[in-house]
Image (cartoon, rainbow, N blue to C red):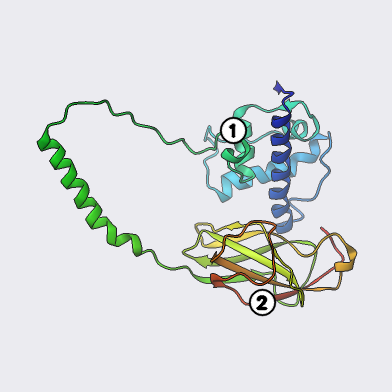
Amino acid sequence: MEKFNNSSTQKEIQALREGIKRKYRTYNLLNRDRFPIFAYNTNRANYEPLAESFREEFYVIRGFDTSDRDIHIPSTNTLAQLFCDEDYLPGKKILNTCQAYADELSSETGIVDTLTASPRVVTVPVKTVSLLLAGIVLVALLFVYIISKPALGNAPPASGLLLNRPSNGRVVPMELLAVGTVLNAQTVWVVIRPKGSNQYFVQPPMKVGDDHTWRGVIYVGSVNMANVGVAFQVRAFVNPVATLKEGDLLHSWPQAELATGIVEVIRGAQTE
């Protein structure tokens, strides 16, 4: 265990805590019995469902081998200290695993490296190269460029964008899981607006998995009880014309390569 006093590191650890909580909420929405809501207090027994979600994330969903030494699932004791001890800083390998679980890049947080290996930089010593060798290399590079250039424009277009959840007419809580599918795309954006309003709220971006599915938590209104009973419209978009960012407030539906139809839901009284 390490101690720290650096305020920037404290902010990074707090961001990591919030990222872990957000990710665990997706598991809770999928299976409330297996991954129940719990109090993030000093009782380490509370953290067993969270530790179980780590094992589910890496050994089932991502397919890592249980013997993989790059994966260090935090114990319930470690998780309790991470969330309750402001001076506690886990070792680097556990931080790596926690950061990967929360799906945040280390370049944004400055805390740890990702679990993927860093690209190696190859240093080529300066040597005298004959004119003949230089010509051979130039011809080879030109040949590779010529045969590969046509392939650059042959990537298939995105298609088949579907918003499978929530379903039309459903009464929903403030936070719920959006699920869908799409082909030949990497990111899906969901936008929500109160019906009849000119305020369109951009939700967190959602990554498309290898099985062409995407999922993520979206927010229907706020904790304000005035939202209860209000109809909200939900749409998903791929490759928007203008750059979108989480939390953007738009005044119309964005233009994009692909868009789903409108799914209309009713905000219920639940906030969880």
In what quadrant of the picture does the C terminus appear?
bottom right
Query: Which residue sits at x=62%, y=60%?
Result: 215
Q: Counting residues from the N terminus, which is met first, the one under dot 2 or under dot 1?
A: 1
Q: Choose top left, top right, bottom left or bottom right for residue 242.
A: bottom right
Query: Callout 2, which amino acid?
Result: Ile
Q: Mark number for residue 112?
A: 1
In what quadrant of the picture does the N terminus appear?
top right
Can you give x and y, in whole percent of width and height, for residue 101 in the image? Answer: 62, 43
Can you give x and y, in whole percent of width and height, for residue 199 in the image? Answer: 74, 69
Q: How many marks?
A: 2
Report the residue marked by disc 2: 262
Dot 2: element? loop
Q: Callout 2: 10 Å neighbours few (<14), some, many (20+)?
A: some
Above or below for 254 versus 109 = below
Residue projecting furthest to the left = 132
Front-lying residue, 147 or 116: 147
Q: Mark number for residue 175?
A: none
Query: Callout 1, which amino acid?
Result: Val
Q: Callout 1: 10 Å neighbours few (<14), some, many (20+)?
A: many
Q: Choose top left, top right, bottom left or bottom right for residue 233.
A: bottom right
